[in-house]
Image (cartoon, grey):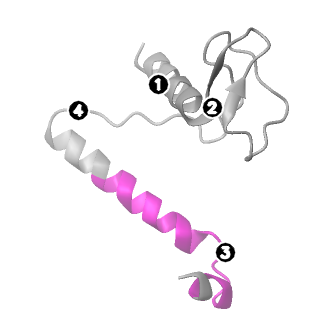
Amino acid sequence: MQGMSQSLNFGKSVHDNGWGIFTSLLDYKLSEQGKELIKIDKWYPSSKTCSCCGKVKEELSLSERMYQCECGFICDRDVNAARNIKKQGMLVLE
């Protein structure tokens, strides 16, 4: 797929298509069960936002695996992002 995306000038669209298919299937399966897929803004800074106090870091490199906030909160960056995504999804439901 990498060669195809480069040679046919598709850019990221070929790679993003898999995610689009996945979310469509997930939405379909959830609706079969009477449930709803909640989407949040794709530009929401879930990794840079402290899930404890809400402060947003200006910079966060990919090599930083632990999220450390000025408020003293320390957490795995992926767990921190997941907590923030859950909070945003809950806000959509309110």
Marks 1 and 2 in Cβ contact (< 8 Å): no
Q: What main secondary structure does the magenta stretch of the protein show? A: helix
Marks 3 and 2, the one that precedes in the sequence: 3
**Which residue carries the number 1 mark?**
86
For discs 2 and 4, the disc positioned in front in the rendered view? 2
Q: CA distance from mark 3 to mark 1?
A: 30 Å
> What span is in magenta?
4-25
Above-or-below relation of 49 to 3: above
Q: Dot 1: what SS?
A: helix
Crowdedness of circle 1 by 10 Å Cα count: few (<14), some, many (20+)? some
Tell which residue pokes out farthest to the bottom in this image: 7
State the separation of the CA atoms marked 2 and 4. Answer: 24 Å
Q: Give me the C-alpha separation between circle 4 and circle 3.
A: 34 Å
User: Does 41 lie within the magenta span?
Assistant: no
- Amino acid carrying mark 2 in the image: Ser
Measuring from the top left, give residue 23's x and y in whole percent.
38, 52
State the mark number for residue 11: 3
Dot 4 amino acid type: Lys
Instruction: Please count the marks in the image.
Output: 4
Which quadrant would residue 20 be assigned to in this image?
A: bottom left
Residue at image x 63%, y 89%?
8
The residue wearing badge 2 is 46
Q: Write the residue at 21% across / 40% down.
A: 31
**Rendered location of residue 68, percent (x, y):** 73, 23
Q: Is residue 24 magenta?
A: yes
Residue placed at 68% from the left, 14% from the top? 54
Residue 74: name its quadrant. top right
